[in-house]
Each structure stands twice: as C-alpha cells, then as structure tokens.
Amino acid sequence: MADPCDEPIFQTRITPHRSLDAGGFRLLLAIFAGCCVTSSIPFVVLGAWPVAGFLGLDLALLYGAFRLSFRAARAYEDVIVTPVELSVARVSAGGRRKEWRFSPGFVRLERQELDEYGVTRLDLVSRGRRVEVAAALGPQARADFARDLSGALAQARRGPRFS
C-alpha cells in the first residue's frame, strides 16, 4: 500500500500556450509560399529578379521565427503538492531543470493583481526564498491555478489522510 505522505494532493504541468499547431503551421507556410511565388512572378518577368530573392528571404525568416517559437514551447513547469512537500520543477526549452522544494506548512502564495487585467504574478514565498510560478498562464488561468494551489496547500497543512 502506498504511503499517504507521498500521495499527490495536487499535480499539474504548465506549458506555454501556442495557438498554432504543426498542421496549421504547414498550412500557413504553404499559403505564404504560394503568395510569395505568385507575387514574385511579375517582378521576375520585368527583370527585377532580386525581388523574388527578398520574398524568399521573407519566407525563410517566417519559417525560422515559427521554429524558434515551437522550440520555446517545449519548456514546462511541474507543480506537485503532497502532505509533506511542495515541489516546483521548471524545465527550459533546452532541457535544463531547476527544482525548488518547500514545506507546505511554511510556504505562502502571494499574488499581484491589477483591477483591469487580473492576476499578473504568483510567487511562492518561504523563509526568504521567492519563486514565481505559473508565469506562462494568462490572467484568468493564473487565478484558477492560484485557487487550486491554495486549496491543495490548505489540505496539505491539515496533514495526510490515513483512512
């Protein structure tokens, strides 16, 4: 039987939002390439062939920008609350991992809010250490995350359930 102290009360993975998936990216790139080819034909016919090269450069820059964006989207943040520990693990797009561990009884969740925008920042504070969490979320999702995490911390402070 599993130890109740090791059972997660709250567990989530936060990833950066991307509104365009790989299929949408290919479609966008194909449409943009078609527009570039179509608009460069009259310039090539008139002898202004360098315009076609610059349109090709635009296409390459668009491709590069989206590849960088998709690479950055590989980053994530794991937050796990058990009755004895709160752990935050942040993994960068390059695979570098940083971890922070807190005792749920001594950690405080601080939020910064703006009336017109919502929750702008969430920090875990304990014994002089401050770690920002859920930075990749939007204001409403960050508020929902803060509500869920606060509830999990309150449950962890009550201790493990053995029955």
Image (tube, rainbow, N blue to C red):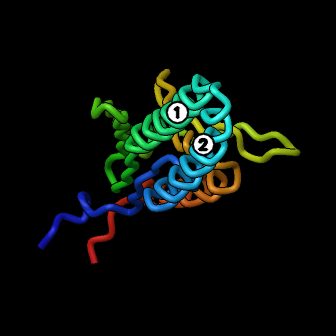
* 107 relative position to 85: left or right: right
User: What is the crowding at mark 2: few (fewer than 14 residues within 10 Å), some, or many (at least 20)?
Assistant: some
Residue 56 image offset from top left, x and y in percent: 52, 33
Label 1: how many residues lie within 10 Å, few (<14), some (14-19) or many (20+)? Answer: some
Q: Seen in the image, is 27 located left or right of residue 111?
A: left
Residue 125 appears anywhere in the view: no
Question: Disc 2 designates what residue?
Answer: 36
| Left or right: 34 as drawn, with respect to 118 | left
Give residue 117's quadrant in the image: top right
Q: Nearer the viewer, residue 85 or 111?
A: 111
Q: Give the percent coordinates (x, y) of residue 85.
A: 33, 46
Left or right: 10 in relation to 139: left
Residue type at tag 2: Cys
Q: Are marks 1 and 2 in contact (CB under 8 Å)?
A: yes
Tell me, for residue 81, which label it has, or none. Answer: none
Q: Can residue 2 be seen in the rendering of this structure?
A: yes
Q: Image height check: is 82 above or below 42?
A: below
